[in-house]
Amino acid sequence: MQQFFCEGPIHIGEDYVLSEAHGHHAQVVRLDHEKVRLVYQGEGFFGECMKKDSQYIVHVEEKDPNMNELGIRITLAAALIRREKFELVLQKATELGVDRIVPFESARCVVHEKKEKSQKLLERWRDIVAEASQQCKRNCIPSVEGIASLKDLAGYRSEINAAAYENAYGTSRYLSEIVDGMKSVTIVIGPEGGFSEEEMMMIQKMGYEAVTLGSRILRAETASVYAVSVCAEIAERMKK
C-alpha cells in the first residue's frame, strides 16, 4: 500500500487531490482504484486512489487508528561521514523511528561540508527522511537539523543522554542499561575515526554518559543504526 504525506486537511467522505509530485509517483507505480494511506499532521487515513483526467484523486473512506510512531523522542546526533554512508544512516534511522537527526562536525571527521553548500545538502537530507517515512508508513517525518559543532550538542540533550565510545567497553554501561523506561533520549555517534580523549571529556561535561556498544569496533554508520535499534526495540516493548 502506498502512502502520501498531505499538505492540506483531509476529510472522510471527501476527495483529496494528490500534489503533482505525488501524482507522478502514483502514475509510476500505476495506481488504479487501489487503497492508499494519506497522512496529515500525524493522522492517517485510508482511501481509494484513482486517476481523473490528468490528476490523481483519493476518495477518503476512513481514519487509520494506528499511530506508527515509537511514543518516545529519540534524537540521533551523528558525526558527518562519507555522503553515501550518511544518507544510509538517515534512511535507516528514519525507518527505525528516530524523531530528530543532528549532523555535526568533530575533529576526526573526514568530511567537512562547505557553508555555501550546506542549505542545498540539508534539503536533500530532508527529502531522504521524508521518502523513508513515506515508505515505512510513519505518521511523522523526523526533523533534520543544520550541521552543528561538537559544542552545540549541549543544546540537544534529552532525559537520557549517551555517547558511544569505543574505549568504553568493559568500564561503562551498555546503551540498553541506561535507556530502559526512557521518555526521550539523545544518542551521540562519532565519525569514522572516533572521538579523541579530549572530545570525549568535553561531551561528558555536557552531560552525556559514555556507553559501550560491545567489544567489536563498529563502523560509524553501523553504530548509528545499532544504537537507534536498541532504543527502538525498548520503546516498542514499552508501548505494549
Image (cartoon, rainbow, N blue to C red):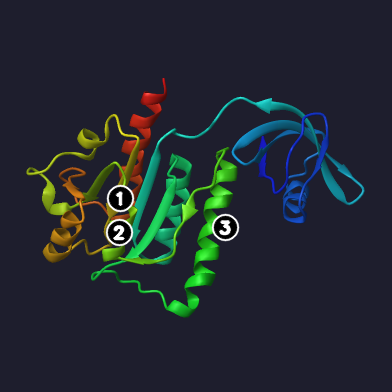
Residue designated by label 2: 153
> How far is disc 3 from disc 1 in space, using C-alphas?
25 Å
142 or 183: which is nearer to us? 183
Residue occupying the point 42% across, 47% down: 93
- How far, Cα to Cα, is label 1 from label 2? 7 Å
How far apart marks 2 and 3 lie (CA) works out to 24 Å
Q: Which residue is mark 1?
A: 157
What is the x, y in percent for residue 56? 82, 45
As shown in the figure, which amino acid type bears the numbered disc 2? Leu
What amino acid is found at the position of numbered circle 1 in the picture? Answer: Arg
Mark 2 or mark 3: whose residue is earlier in sequence? 3
Residue 123 found in image quarter: bottom right
Q: Is residue 60 above or below residue 134?
A: above
Which residue is under mark 3? 127
Of mark 3 and mark 1, the one earlier in the sequence is: 3
Which of the pair 11/211 is nearer the observer?
11
x%, y% of residue 104? 34, 64
The location of residue 34, given as percent across then percent down, is 77, 33
Q: Is disc 1 surrounded by few (<14), some (14 to 19) or many (20+) residues within 10 Å?
A: some
Q: Secondary structure at mark 3?
A: helix
